[in-house]
Amino acid sequence: MKKAIATEKAPKALGPYSQGIAFGNLLFVSGQTPIVPADGTIPAGVVEQSKRALENVKAVVEAAGASMASVLKTTVFLKDMKDFPAMNEVYASYFAGTFPARSTVEVARLPKDVLVEIEAIVGL
């Protein structure tokens, strides 16, 4: 049975979807943009946006009772692939030991014109 995961520590969904869905021993975290949940602001620059997006992913992961060490796979959506090195440096700081599998793609546009969005699949 699937179970919706929600937390006030991540931004509310911008549409008809859940922040996360737990199903069996997996958690699917919806793409998290760098919106600050407390006030709806968006930090400037890809470094700060990457940090905020990962903090939002972390909040959903922790709301499901897991940790970032349990992340199996991520997908990173970048507005511009030139930002890959900066995003990658921030990303690496959120994981220790074995890194999750990952795909990174450049996209034409993201919600609210942010620079990065990150989704994850997590083992529970």
Image (cartoon, helix red, strand yellow):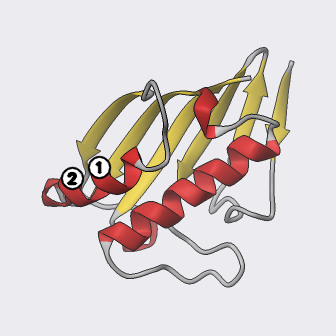
Depicted 84 relative to depicted 100: above or below = below
Which part of the image, by quadrant, shows the C terminus?
A: top right
Where residue 95 sits in the image (x, y, percent)? 49, 40
x%, y% of residue 19?
A: 69, 48
Q: Is residue 29 above or below residue 26?
A: below
How far across and down, in percent of the image, does residue 80 sit? 19, 59
Contact (CB < 8 A) between labels 1 and 2?
yes
Q: In this orientation, which residue lies closer to the viewer: 36 or 71?
A: 71
Look at discs 1 and 2 and give the one toward the viewer. 1
- Whether residue 6 appears in this view of the structure is yes
Would you identify the image quadrant in which residue 108 lies?
bottom left
Residue 52 is left or right of residue 66, and the answer is left
Q: Residue at x 42, y 29 (%)?
A: 99
Where 15 falls versus 44 (above or below)?
A: above
| Residue annotated with mark 1 | 88
Numbered disc 2: secondary structure = helix
Q: Position of residue 118 (x, y in %)?
A: 46, 48
Instruction: Answer left or right for 19 relative to 120.
Output: right
Three-letter amino acid code of the residue under disc 1: Asn
- SS assignment at label 1: helix
Q: Please name the residue shown 33% across and 66% down the image.
A: 115
What's the amino acid at mark 2? Answer: Phe
Q: Quadrant of the N terminus?
A: top right
Tally of numbered discs? 2
Residue at 79 percent of width and 15 percent of height: 24
Determine crowd level at label 2: few under 14, some 14-19, many 20+ residues with C-alpha closer than 10 A. Answer: some
Query: What whole-number distance in Å separates the C-alpha atoms at marks 1 and 2?
Result: 6 Å
**In the image, farthest residue toward the front:** 97
**Where is mark 2, residue-wise?**
84
The residue at 26%/51% (across/down) is 107
